[in-house]
Image (tube, rainbow, N blue to C red):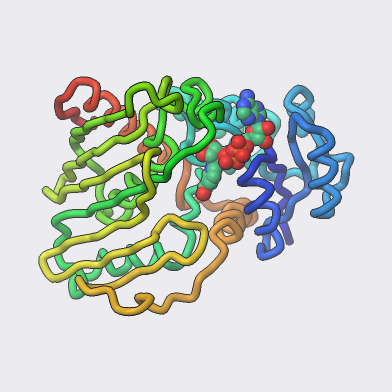
Amino acid sequence: KTVGFALVGIGKLSMEQLLPAFAKCEYARPVALVSGHPEKAKEQAAKYGIDPKNIYNYENYDTIKDNPAIDVVYIVLPNGMHAEYTIRGAQAGKHVLCEKPMANTPAECAAMIDACEKAARKLMIAYRLQYEPVTQKAIELARSPEAVGVIKQVTAEGGFNIGDPTQWRLNRKLAGGGSMMDIGIYALQAARYLSGEEPVEVTAISYSTPNDPRFKEVEETVAFDLKFKSGAIGSCVSSYGYGCNRFRVYGTKGQIQSEPYLSYQGNRLWQGNDREGNGLEITPGNHFALEMDHMAQCVLDDKTPKTPGAEGLQDVKIITAIYEAARRGAAVKIV
Ligand code: NAD
């Protein structure tokens, strides 16, 4: 038995990663597309065996309620559109898989959770790394008394040098913020899932190159520190100015490190301070296929996803506190 997915938004991620990944799925299959570009949608539908009758646009999106082939809507739109399309999807009776970051504000996230609860539909946030074996091995080692011991610090970085100044990622309304919303969220996720803890307080410094046309509305770089309940510290960086893609977990017994850790493939993990060869041998998997299959299995078995709406809300809540800490130049408590 398989679960039918409608991709909502067919941009770069949908076309280059998600549509091809369905071929590796056991339970998820693409059955519909929602797009503002009918020609592109027709082309992609033909390429992936999707019935052209199941092509929708943003205006007639709500009529998916009459299409029983669609079980799940996968929201792959700019961040500022996630809330509206998740809520309309749930109201049309569909389960929702939504890309990260969940939405621009904690209030939007709460409204999404509420809409899915009211409609008795599942809501999962697409944190692909939590479904793939390298991250899962890192979490296992981070918890291991022999490999790491008591965790004292997690360092995590996420960044790339962003291009075109006119893209939605640099538009405040559509992106919700700058690098922190898009790529810094991976560093925040890593600090949270590696430590296995929630931060109680954050501090942050934000910087944007003056007169750079890319950073008129959103920030370039954020350096942020997290204080966890146990006393462990998270030291993280997010940037749209330069490439960085690694983490380290330091404990009383030892350490683990990964670089890259957030790429679509080829992520590497080492135990200890030295980096020998390519690191631990871990059979890789397609992140997107694993993630979509998880959602499909949750629908089939009536289970709660491992990364539900609450997980997305928690990140957006912490990011909001990080922005506030940077603005005020003072520590902000997370309540
Ligand atoms: P993209 O710009 O390539 O695609 C966005 C799509 O939204 C396009 O098809 C565009 O036509 C459509 N759209 C509708 N209204 C729009 C508007 N007003 N302005 C701009 N586009 C509009 O973006 P993408 O890289 O595919 O990202 C989409 C979502 O996926 C984002 O939330 C992003 O954070 C997320 N994402 C996640 C990963 C991951 O690894 N999980 C990777 C990339 C992107």
The residue sitting at 63% across, 44% down in the picture is 12
Can you see residue 96? Answer: no
Q: In which quarter of the image is ligand 1?
A: top right
Decide: is 299 above or below 183.
below
Residue 2 lies, in percent from the top left, at 72, 58
Can you see residue 250? Answer: yes
Residue 58 lies, in percent from the top left, at 73, 26
Q: Name the side, left or right, on which 116 lies relative to 306.
A: right
The residue sitting at 19% across, 38% down in the picture is 200
Residue 163 lies, in percent from the top left, at 50, 37
Decide: is 258 above or below 207.
below
Question: For the C terminus, which image quadrant?
Answer: top left
Q: Which of 59 and 323 is in front in this view?
A: 323
The residue sitting at 17% across, 59% down in the picture is 151
Residue 79 lies, in percent from the top left, at 52, 31
Q: Quadrant of residue 248?
A: bottom left
Q: Quadrant of residue 119?
A: top right
Q: Name the side, left or right, on which 296 lies relative to 67.
A: left
The residue sitting at 19% across, 28% down in the picture is 332
Question: For the N terminus, which image quadrant?
Answer: bottom right
